Image (cartoon, helix red, strand yellow):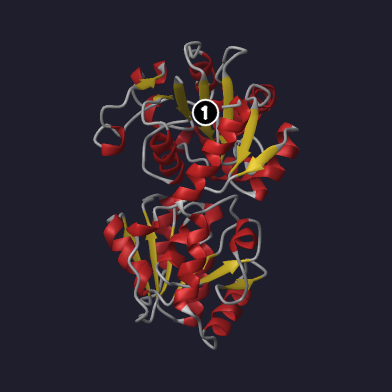
Amino acid sequence: MRVAIVCDWIKDWGWAELVLSHLLEIFPDADIYTSVFFQADNPVFKDRKVVTSFIQKIPFLNKSHKLALTLRPLAFESFDLSWYDLVISSTSAESKWVITKPETLHLCYCHTPTRYFWSHYHEYLDMMEFGLLNPLWKWLMPRIVHKLRQWDFVASKRPDYFIANSENTKKRIEKYYKREALVIYPGLDLSDFKFDDKKQDYYLYVGRCIPYKKFDLIVDTFNKNQKKVILVTNTDNKLYRKLKAISNSNIEWKLNPSRYEISLLYSKAKAFLFPSEEDFWLVPIEAMATWTPVIAYSKWWALETVLDWKTWVFFSEQTVDSLNEAVNKFENMKFDYKYINEYSKKFSKEIFKEKILNFIKEKRNI
């Protein structure tokens, strides 16, 4: 069976790329198609055929999601996938726009319907940073996105089947694309994580420092309660610098630590903080794999992953008082660390790979 896996872009190493690596384990001979590719030194892609679009050859645009926005639909439609029996688009943006032959099975593994077209459009518009051009872009973007939103809806009819990464994403697919989806959770290689039941006196948060991740809520909360927290990010932007400048001494920032260092931070943290509203996010599962309980905002993905009060503590509002109340509640509780670790095994990559392969076999009548 000739297989192509299509991704929005391959620039950094995040959750979408982790899913891609697991799909490549299922289909070791699959070819990869993407708008741009900047992971040539990553061993995951060694000896792989990676086909990039014309955007790869355009300086500056090839490294800007925002400025290449109107080019990506054309880029994905330009790929010739007529040779393949199976096409899997792994996407939160435009890679599902590829055109396949009627006899080709096209599965879309959807991380979320395109955020900047649909659910988080206004938030993305507010956070755009183009310097002196910002007023122009703020005027222009609504006009561009209006048309792209229409095209995205049309393109959502191209996959034969949708697979959603969470129940929340499934609901968004139904709302925005009017399509049904099967939920298959992404997974982790749980053998990668160390664990330690001798917890140290600090809380931990890991993520991109962008508005909806709510780093500002954690800074405000821990500035007030004076408890120690370590904030880990790979994002050096205006928001990161602003929040770091107003952080008290009990708040420690770590920019771009190694994967090994992050794993150690997980294992020794007294609790992991999960303040954002997510479609799906494996970071809290990573924390649980290292025997670390989670304090979470009680919405969307957090409610899908929780089993009971033995693994998580919830807060109901994204406010300082609500988060502080949860922190105080946590400090008066006891947790079974082995129980937390066992629960994380529900999200192993082996389960993900088995379910994906079974779905494909069913649809191809293999």
Residue in the picture at 63% in, 59% down: 304
Q: Residue under circle 1?
A: 88
- Image position of 67 (left or right of 308): left
Residue 321 against residue 80 in the figure, above or below: below
How packed mark 1 is, by other alpha carbons closer than 10 Å (few <14, some 14-19, many 20 or more), is many
Residue found at the very far left of the displayed protein = 41
- The image shows residue 87 at horizontal and vertical percentages of 52, 23
Q: Going by the image, does 150 lie left or right of 305?
A: right
Image quadrant where one finds the C terminus: top right
Closer to the camera in the image, 165 or 27: 27
- Residue drawn where x is 47% and y is 27% of the image: 6
For this rendering, which residue is in front, 35 or 80? 80
Residue type, numbered disc 1: Ile
Q: Residue 236, position in %: x, y? A: 36, 51
Could one spot residue 195 in this view of the protein?
Answer: yes
Among all residues in the image, which is located at the extreme front? 366
Q: Is residue 65 left or right of residue 51?
A: right
Answer whether residue 252 is visible to the viewer in this image: no
Q: Secondary structure at mark 1?
A: strand
Above or below: residue 1 compared with residue 187: above
Question: x and y percent of residue 134 in the render?
Answer: 52, 36
- Residue at horizontal 37 percent and vertical 20 percent from the top: 51
Outermost residue toward the bottom in this view: 332
* Image side of residue 299 versus residue 202, left or right: right
Count of number-bearing discs: 1
Q: Is residue 176 above or below residue 203?
A: above
The quarter holding residue 256 reads bottom left
